[in-house]
Amino acid sequence: MESLADAVREITQTIFVTVFDREAYDGAPPGDAELARAVASWVHISGAWDGSVLVQLPRPLALQLAGTMFASDPAAVTPEELRDAMGEIANMIGGNLKAVLPAPSRLSLPSHAMEGLGGEVVHVNGASERVDLACEGAFVVVTVSRPREGASNP
């Protein structure tokens, strides 16, 4: 398997093109203040491989993607639709990543933070790989974290 970060990058770029008809390309990391205000969703993968996939986007881009997903004007996207769209993005990335990881594994239902996560969801005693992309001038951050070999997570 290619590196985990390369797999995440390729999966995310493919989803953005095929589902949203938008390019996601390598981008500069957002500042801490921007990331702290991001809309976020994450899923957990458990089984032969344990870890989490966190997706963070600025609200305007998240609304655009939700509008595409629900075939509606981004200004008309409800908070529930935004949560559903963000959850589905995390689910698609996590599900495609799970397919290239050791089996058997299960994918959790998505969890959400509409804004103000204030950091990243990482495993205690864990390691993470972060992929910084951009779409239409806005950041797309996907972080995969997992416990270090031999480390326990409380």
Image (cartoon, helix red, strand yellow):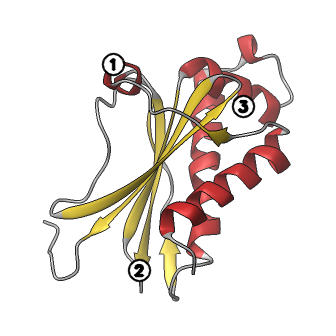
Residue 7: name its quadrant.
bottom right
> Please, what is the three-letter code of the amino acid marked with disc 1?
Ala
Residue 71 seen by the camera: yes
Q: Residue furthest top?
A: 75
- The Cα–Cα distance between marks 2 and 1, rounded to whole angstroms, is 32 Å
Q: Quadrant of the N terminus?
A: bottom right
Q: Marks 3 and 1, Cα distance to the nearest angstrom? A: 22 Å
User: Which SS class for mark 1?
Assistant: helix
Residue picked out by circle 3: 65
> Which mark, residue 33?
1
Residues under labels 3 and 2: Cα distance?
A: 29 Å
**Amino acid type indicated by mark 2:** Trp
Q: Position of residue 137 (x, y in %)?
A: 65, 22
Dot 2: what SS? loop
Q: Position of residue 98 (x, y in %)?
A: 56, 73
Residue 49 quadrant? bottom left
Q: Are marks 3 and 1 in contact (CB under 8 Å)?
A: no
Which numbered dot is residue 49?
A: 2
Q: Which residue occupies 22% across, 73% down?
A: 148
Mark nearer the viewer, 2 or 1: 1
Few, some or many residues within 10 Å of mark 2 (<14, 14–19, 20+): some
Q: Position of residue 123 (x, y in %)?
A: 24, 59
